[in-house]
Amino acid sequence: MRIQRVVLHRLAMPLVSPFRTSFGTETARDVLLVEVEGTDSIGWGECVAMSEPLYSSEYVEGAHSVIRSHLLPRLCAAGPDVKAEEVASVLSEVKGHQMAKAAIETAILDAGLRAVGVSLAASLGGARQRVAAGVSVGIATSISGLIDTVGGYLADGYVRIKLKIEPGWDVEPVAAVRERFGPDLPLQVDANTAYTLADAAHLAQLDRFGLLLIEQPLAEHDLSGHADLARRIETPICLDESITGLAVAVDALDRGACSIINIKAGRVGGYLEAKAIHDVCFERGVPVWCGGMLETGIGRAANVALASLPGFSLPGDTSASRRYFQRDVTDPFELDSGHLAVPAGPGIGVAPIPEVLEDLTTSREEIPW
Ligand code: NPG
């Protein structure tokens, strides 16, 4: 497969309800899709950067700019036959920008796999045809509202609940959800870096709820703080924002900063790096799960493929399309007894529906290779 051109699509997609985390409230997604047109196939990748640099330093306008001005020129210089496996090294001189790099690598990977008729799941070493779906529940305005929301998701069939927490919204909502839905509900919390080590005693109050894990309680760069916290609380620590690649993942595990890892391909620079992190964790017996970034069906398809690898032993933030969007850009992902089917078709196995893509599009930029 020789690459002929790239099309950068921007889409505006309202969320079905606002999603509040400790770092902000999302009400709509400004989506950047990368389309790579090859001689034999077309591939798609979704950039998971949000509108503002609040979760991490990346944001969608910046990702669009770095792709156009710094990443594509380097890849084009590498020639039209560049393989997905070569993308990371060609782009390595550009520091950071993992989400932008991941979007391009995924589109090239998808195009290459479609050309040879192999699914992304199969190429990564997927071991299951369906994956367990968890759901992430935003910070609510009242405990009763939270209980209703969680009840609704459980009625939908979700097999695990993740509650977003922040100082002032932690022990009480967790206690209420545990009380209402019982000790057997797989439950975890996500702080998105909202605490400091001074909160250790407060966070230890969560220990009595038998949580699967607490995700990213402290700052992104604070591995030693997480290692310290891990000695002071019983709830297992899972890292998300801190894990920006394989080397950091290994360092975090070696230092005891976490015992579980949330793998998001966008955050680590692509699905190949995500697989490498999975492989190391699998070898070391460290559980991993697949995170989510409010993806459209394009990003969701690739996440579900990743989550089919054998080390993904905890349910992921791999929710159905309708959790976020009234109308997805692909055929919607739907829950089937709390699971999503892993796409079996070539590449990521899904593509935008042309009319829907057109309706949602706010800009389109063609870049010859
Ligand atoms: O189901 O796609 C999903 C979202 C899961 O909670 C979720 N994502 O911190 O992991 C996170 C959080 C997030 C959302 C992060 C939006 C960044 C932006």
Image: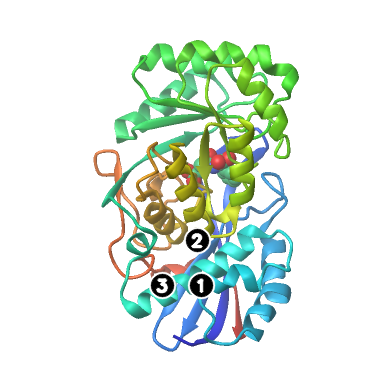
Q: Assess whether mark 1 and mark 2 are in contact (beta carbons under 8 angstroms).
A: yes
Q: Position of residue 317 (x, y in %)?
A: 45, 42
Q: Which residue is denoted by mark 2 in the rendering?
A: 272
Residue 122 appears anywhere in the view: yes
Q: Which mark is residue 84?
A: 1
Dot 1 amino acid type: Ala
Looking at marks 2 and 1 on the same chain, the residue that comes earlier in the sequence is marked by: 1
Q: Which residue is denoted by mark 3 in the rendering?
A: 355
Alpha-carbon neighbours of circle 3 within 10 Å: few (<14), some, or many (≥20)? few
Alpha-carbon neighbours of circle 2 within 10 Å: few (<14), some, or many (≥20)? many
Residue 358 appears anywhere in the view: no
Q: Position of residue 211 (x, y in %)?
A: 47, 21
Element at label 1? helix
Q: Quadrant of ligand 1?
A: top right
Q: Assess whether mark 1 and mark 3 are in contact (beta carbons under 8 angstroms).
A: no
Alpha-carbon neighbours of circle 1 within 10 Å: few (<14), some, or many (≥20)? many
